Image (cartoon, rainbow, N blue to C red):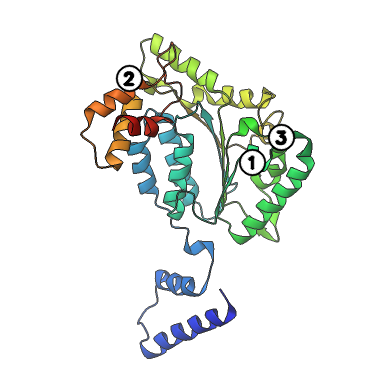
């Protein structure tokens, strides 16, 4: 926005107030006026916590831990006028279990755009950090990028996908940003949200899910405490993890390790129904069953690809 545009908007607002002065100017009205002349991310940041909770409940299948942890973590974080630390969540589980879906939900219910907001930043190691021998350069570039975006928007969301492909050592440059005292250009940026996504630890999650079933219990009986410490150790000790020997892990800078459980045929068929409903074909039970039958399952009856290939299967049978 140019200076002339800003000045013209200010004049317009001034005229309105001069001709028709309101009896009381509310905080909402002041923000609306401010947002007509500003490009601040505060104007785009419109958290809808109830919408997020409903979306998680309605569209995320077989993931009671993620539903509970993510909704409560975000709600509690946003209640704080001045949080002590940023919200840092690490999502773990097999492919197609909903990790990326939840990230999209967060973007949609905080900024009204799944991944389209300029204040949501997604990093994919194979694209942004592909060469293990350039760790020093990547660290410098990432630090500069994060500092610049935090300066622009304190409510920035940073998503690091496929952490199992991240060269070890790169992500540690973020350690100061995740602590309680980091300051950038005289301003504290503890209102940011960081999300790490990884398949590391899926074997631990799948093993506990199977043991729970063999014990005659429901998967909903699994608690966060049953997995959180094991996941922390798994990413810290795994040489193929971007968190290998990471200061972020040893400093306990991850607020929550969020497990995504493996999906079975019932969950796959619910994903198929959701896909059909989005196309106005909710009643096609024949397609739902065909998709469920066509998926590949492990000997433990878990879907090998979760719900990832469901849209393609729906296209095949519709």
Q: Which residue is mark 2?
A: 293
Alpha-carbon span between mark 1 and mark 3: 24 Å
Q: Earlier in the sequence, mark 1 or mark 2?
A: 1
Is 133 located above or below residue 240 in the figure?
Answer: below
Is 62 or 87 nearer to us in this picture?
Answer: 62
Q: Earlier in the sequence, mark 2 or mark 3?
A: 3
Kindly indicate the quadrant of the structure image that contains residue 87.
top right
Q: Which residue is mark 3?
A: 247
Alpha-carbon span between mark 1 and mark 2: 35 Å
Is there a contact, CB below 8 Å, between mark 1 and mark 2? no
> Could one spot residue 132 in this view of the protein?
yes
Kindly indicate the quadrant of the structure image that contains residue 262.
top left
Q: Residues within 10 Å of mark 2 (few under 14, many from 20)?
A: few
Is 216 located above or below residue 65 in the figure?
Answer: above
Is residue 147 found left or right of 17 in the rendered image?
right
Q: Which residue is mark 1?
A: 127
């Amino acid at each position: 926005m140019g200076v002339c545009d800003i000045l013209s908007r200010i004049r317009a607002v001034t005229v309105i107030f001069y001709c028709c002065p309101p009896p009381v100017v509310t905080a909402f009205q002041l923000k609306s006026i401010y947002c007509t002349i500003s490009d601040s991310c505060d104007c785009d940041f419109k958290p809808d916590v109830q919408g997020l909770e409903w979306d998680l409940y309605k569209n995320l299948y077989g993931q009671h831990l993620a539903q509970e942890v993510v909704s409560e973590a975000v709600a509690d974080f946003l209640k704080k006028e001045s949080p002590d630390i940023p919200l840092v969540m690490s999502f773990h589980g097999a492919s197609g279990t909903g990790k990326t879906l939840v990230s999209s939900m967060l973007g949609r219910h905080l900024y009204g755009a799944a991944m389209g907001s300029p204040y949501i930043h997604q990093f994919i190691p194979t694209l942004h950090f592909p060469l293990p021998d350039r760790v020093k350069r990547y660290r410098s570039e990432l630090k500069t990028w994060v500092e610049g975006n935090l300066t622009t928007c304190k409510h920035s969301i940073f998503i690091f996908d496929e952490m199992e492909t991240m060269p070890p050592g790169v992500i540690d440059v973020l350690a100061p940003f995740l602590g309680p005292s980091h300051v950038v250009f005289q301003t504290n940026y503890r209102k940011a949200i960081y999300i790490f996504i990884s398949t590391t630890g899926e074997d631990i999650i799948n093993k506990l899910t199977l043991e729970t079933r063999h014990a005659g219990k429901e998967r909903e009986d699994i608690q966060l405490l049953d997995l959180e410490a094991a996941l922390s150790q798994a990413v810290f000790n795994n040489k193929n993890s971007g968190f290998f020997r990471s200061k972020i892990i040893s400093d306990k800078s991850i607020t929550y390790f969020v497990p995504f459980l493996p999906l079975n045929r019932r969950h796959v068929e619910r994903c198929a129904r959701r896909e059909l409903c989005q196309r106005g074909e909710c009643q096609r039970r024949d397609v739902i069953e065909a998709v469920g039958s066509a998926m590949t399952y492990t000997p433990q009856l878990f879907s090998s690809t979760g719900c990832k290939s469901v849209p393609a299967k729906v296209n095949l049978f519709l």
